[in-house]
Amino acid sequence: MLSLESLREFTKKYQTKETNVLREYVQHLFLSSLYRFPGSERLLFKGGTALRIIYQSPRFSEDLDFTGQNIYAASTIDALFISAVAEVEKSGIHIELKEAKPTTGGYLGIIRYELYDFTEDMKFEVSLRRGTAANKEVSSIMNDYHPSYPLFHLAPSEIVRGKMAALLDRQKPRDYYDLYFILRHPELSHYVDKKLLPRVKESVLKSRINFKKELTVLLPVSHHLLLKEFSRVLSTEILKYL
């Protein structure tokens, strides 16, 4: 387990709060543990945390999202997550599967962990996909917290498609920011459905979201100025694709 002093050094490097660094450390420990076990290759990582961990988005993320490929029993997911939690606990972190249950379309749970004086619940969700094969890739994750490890994830085209669907469905501040990051990314931007961008532009300009209030805690200090007029900033970026 990394010392608190070492983790605090990362808060300076990433220009962020200690809570974000501690959470991200646990995320890396959990994912590196999970993908050691046979069958974990059917859990394909996705979402905002995937943008951060695979593609180096500046935005820290709070939850873990997966697509489950041809998983037919909740017990399969149970076993993988219990094994991963047990593996993380060997590092000296108190961690437990606080809640885990099947849902209509998948599986939902909460991981509770205690690290030094910090305690937090971290949600995870698995959306099950049966039959149709998901496009997937495996990446070697280089990071500051832990030796590199393999990570199975949705193909970038599907990660982007999922983020666009989430944005249009719930219009959360973090989804708007993730689109901004995607549009500026040399690889991910190729997968954006340009036909959807006018709707996004209209919605963000009509929105009364206080982006500074909602996103400051998740972004490095160097990005805070961007949030003052984020609706205009995002709409300007969208215009480059129209």
Image (spheres, rainbow, N blue to C red):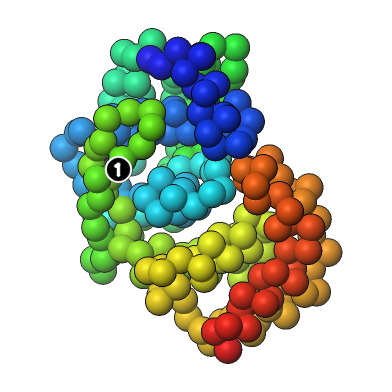
Residue 8, by quadrant, is top right
Quarter of the image that includes the N terminus: top left
Q: Is 40 left or right of 191, judged from the image as shown?
A: left
In this rendering, would 178 be left or right of 144?
Answer: right
Counting from the top left corner in percent of width and height, residue 36 is at: 20, 33
| Residue at 74% over, 68% down | 231
Q: Which residue is drawn at 31% across and 40% down?
A: 142
Q: Circle 1: is it few (<14), some (14-19), or many (20+) Cα within 10 Å?
A: some
- In the image, is residue 11 above or below residue 68? above
Q: Which amino acid does label 1 sit on?
A: Ile
In the rendered image of this protein, does residue 143 appear above or below residue 127?
above
Instruction: Please say whether residue 227 is visible from this viewpoint.
Output: yes
Residue extending farthest right: 208
Q: Is residue 104 visible?
A: no
The x, y position of residue 233, in whole percent, is 70, 69
Against 38, residue 94 (above or below) is: above
**What residue does disc 1 label?**
141
